[in-house]
Image: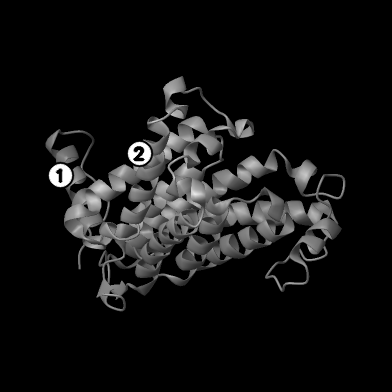
Amino acid sequence: WMFGYGTPETIAIVRILFGTLIFINLLMLMNVFEAFFTEKGFVPVAFAERWADGVPRLTVLAGVTDSRITLAVFIITMLGCVGTALGLFTRVSSAIMWLGLTSIHHRTPDLLHSGDTLMRAFALYIMVAPSGAVYSLDWLRKFKRTGDATVPEVSLWPHRLMAIQVAIVYFTTVWHKWGGSTWRDGTATWYTSQLHEFDRFPVPAFVDQQPFVAILTYGTLIVEIMLATTVFYKPLRKISLLLGIGLHLGIEYRFNIPLFAFLMIASYASFYEGFEWRAWVNKWKAKRQAKGQGQESHEPAIST
């Protein structure tokens, strides 16, 4: 299972989703570029260096105080994201995306949340995986050049690492939460509701009162432990993921944590096999053709 071979559709779907989301994330950071990524802002380079406290970091922005260089890294990284999402020169594009994103995060670490950590991890997996083997411009270029639309089987260990990474995120979350008394006594979500600096949309008053607080507190723990365990058991996978989507959409509605919910939900794609994505795509194409929409497709049919 871990080191077997299979179709690369899952890796391609993850590549498209994370390439797009990382691009959007960097676009959002561009709005606060001067405030957080220049010497004129709140976080000059010297502050970021002190924050690291001598820990070695992989970054192309170490000691860089010229905002023009930092801006260039932003732009190059965003181009890498576009190339990754489109699957154009995928290996090079994904390497640029990963290195640039890692450098930007080390430049101003105070802006980060756990979703940013997941972004870096998935950017690494996308880089080392055969991410452009299908659903990519590289794949289409190969087809036009050779007429061969065959999608070869690939090593699945990067795909498995993605799924295991997500499970570890949820398992360690529950592990740390259970170490706090408020999660054990059923009051934790009341305290998070008092962080009004994160408020987005209003919720009914009863949501912050018992017994609903206890339901949300223990319900969150149950959903998170399911996303670390039962999600790997196919009969329970769908309900586990649907509960996870509901959890994160609820967080997204109430709290302003940029892209966090979308990143977590996007990572759920890694729990499906490549042949399942292929079946859904082929089913969608069959329905489209049955309805007679559009002319005869010139897209290469996936073959093995």
Which residue: 76% across, 46% down? Answer: 36
Q: Callout 1: helix, strand or loop? A: helix
Q: Which residue is mark 1?
A: 286
Establish if 293 lies above or below 179. Answer: above
Question: Could you tell me residue 301's position as x and y percent?
Answer: 22, 57
Residue 32 placement (x, y as % from top left): 72, 40
Task: From the top left corner, tell me how far across and down residue 66 is, in percent.
Answer: 85, 56
Instruction: Tell me: residue 40, above or below residue 174.
Output: above
Task: Determine whether 266 is above or below 162 in the image.
Answer: above
Front position in the image: 153 or 33: 33
Label 2 secondary element = helix
Q: Residues within 10 Å of mark 2 (few under 14, many from 20)?
A: some
**Callout in the foreground (2, 1):** 2
As drawn, which residue projects farthest toward the bottom?
Answer: 3
For the point 45% across and 27% down, the residue is 209
Viewed as shown, does residue 288 lie left or right of 270? left
Which quadrant is home to the C terminus? bottom left
Provide the residue designation for mark 2: 246
Question: Crowdedness of circle 1 by 10 Å Cα count: few (<14), some, many (20+)?
Answer: few
Q: Amino acid at mark 1?
A: Ala
Q: What amino acid is found at the position of numbered circle 2 in the picture?
A: Gly
Coloration of the structure image: one colour
Q: Which mark is residue 73?
A: none
- Count of numbered circles in the view: 2
Quadrant in which residue 12 is drawn: bottom left
Quadrant location, the N terminus: bottom left
Q: Is residue 299 above or below residue 304?
A: above
Asked whether residue 259 is in view, the answer is yes
Query: How far apart, in angstroms, are the residues tagged by discs 2 and 1?
Result: 30 Å
Give residue 254's position: percent from left, percent from top: 49, 31
Does residue 135 appear in the picture of this structure? Answer: no
Lower sequence index among marks 2 and 1: 2
